[in-house]
Amino acid sequence: MPEIQINFLAIGIAVIATFFFGFIWYTPLFGKAWAKEMGRDPDAKPSGGHMAKGMIMMVLGNFFMAYVFANNLAVWNPETWGQGSMENSSLMFAFSASFFTWLGFFLPNDLSTVAWEQKSWKLFSINTVYHFLSLLIAALILVNM
């Protein structure tokens, strides 16, 4: 059994990158639409404490996602098993890993919000595309560092 090497610098960079991506996605790009679909006032500003708590939880969640994803990527990397090189296929590897992780673990939960929580398809689209792109950003960093 091979020893899996985890690059904590890459994990840290992935956490920071996905944090800023989340800020951009849910603030200037889709913040008002997301708030409206959630039934919240799009112009309401959260309190400082609520914002700090949300940011801490997001960083923690991004860390868990990046750490587990780094482990998964390492396990599925042919180099880990001495089965070839990733030199020419790292982009495809990152895309495939992101897509199949999203398809199996994120998409089903996102669909459940429509089915069981009666959330709109618009909210589903905002959230599920965010989940896929976050995974892709993290994978590109984790695979190429």
Image (spheres, rainbow, N blue to C red):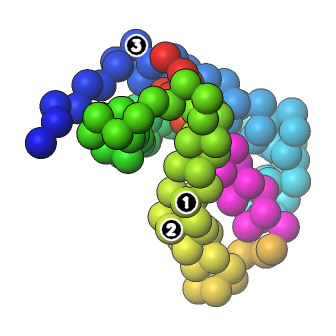
Up/down of 8 relative to 80, above or below: above
Choose between 125 and 52: the one closer to the eye.
125
Residue identifier under label 2: 104
Residue at the limit of the structure toward the top, as seen here: 9
Q: Determine whether, in the image, residue 26 is placed left or right of residue 16.
A: right
Q: Which amino acid type is shown beneath numbered disc 3?
A: Leu
- The amino acid at mark 1 is Phe
Picture coordinates of residue 142, whole percent (x, y) = 48, 27
From the image, which quarter does the N terminus lie in? top left
Which residue in the protein does label 3 denote?
9
| Mark 3, other Cα within 10 Å: few <14 / some 14–19 / many ≥20 | few
Amino acid type of disc 2? Gly
Q: What secondary structure predominates along the stretch shown in magenta?
A: helix
Residue depicted at 87% across the width and 39% down the height: 29
C-alpha distance separating marks 3 and 1: 24 Å
Is mark 3 in CB contact (under 8 Å) with mark 1?
no
| Residue designated by label 1 | 100
Q: Along the horizontal axis of the image, is 86 left or right of 39? A: left
Q: Nearer the viewer, mark 1 or mark 2?
A: 1
Q: CA distance from mark 1 to mark 2?
A: 6 Å
Residue 94 lies in what quarter of the image?
top right
Disc 2 on helix, strand or loop? helix
* Quadrant of the image occupied by residue 2: top left
Q: Is residue 140 above or below residue 10?
A: below
The kind of secondary structure element at disc 3 is helix
Residue drawn at point x = 74 percent, y = 54 percent: 129
